Amino acid sequence: MEILADRSRKLRKAVYKVDETMKEKFPAKTSSEAIEDQVDYCQQLIQVIEKDPVCSEIPKVKESLNRLKETCICQLKNPPCSHLKFPHLIYSFNGGMGQ
């Protein structure tokens, strides 16, 4: 989750260097620590930036935008602790089945 906040912050900063008026168009930052809320905020931010063809094509902005998109996709595909959803499937191997 911290990586989402870090990457969204870097993206906003890159955009501000190009066009400070974009700040008014950005969604309100989330104070929630829920991964779903963080991803939702990032997706809203991405949409706003992509609607501005000039800003979204600036190399520094485009690079940060792509990193944030990749991170959002990874978080949706592999949420933290997803391996703990089915703890009953985790078992110790004792040298053979049935022992």
Image (tube, helix red, strand yellow):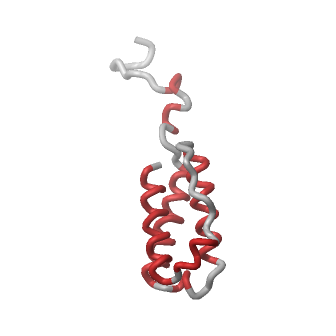
Q: Taking 46 as reference, is 58 above or below it?
A: below
Q: Residue at x 59, y 68 (%)?
A: 46
Q: Is residue 23 above or below residue 72?
A: below
Q: Position of residue 61 (x, y in %)?
A: 47, 78
- Residue at far bottom of view: 54
Q: Residue sitting at 49 percent across and 36 percent down?
A: 83
Front residue of 37 and 77: 37
Q: How far from the left and from the top, in percent, is residue 19? A: 53, 82
Please give left or right for residue 46 compared with residue 58 in the image.
right
Q: Disc count in the image?
A: 0
Determine the residue positioned at 50% across, 77% down: 15
Residue 3 drawn above or below residue 56: above
Q: Where residue 57 appears, x then y in whole percent?
A: 53, 85
Q: Quadrant of the C terminus?
A: top left
* Residue at 49% in and 69% down: 12
Outermost residue toward the left in this view: 95
Q: At which x and y percent is residue 62?
A: 49, 78
Along the line of sight, which residue is nearer the eye, 73 or 53?
Answer: 53
Q: Nearer the viewer, residue 33 or 50?
A: 33
Of 81 and 42, the residue lying toward us: 42
The residue lying furthest to the top in this view is 99
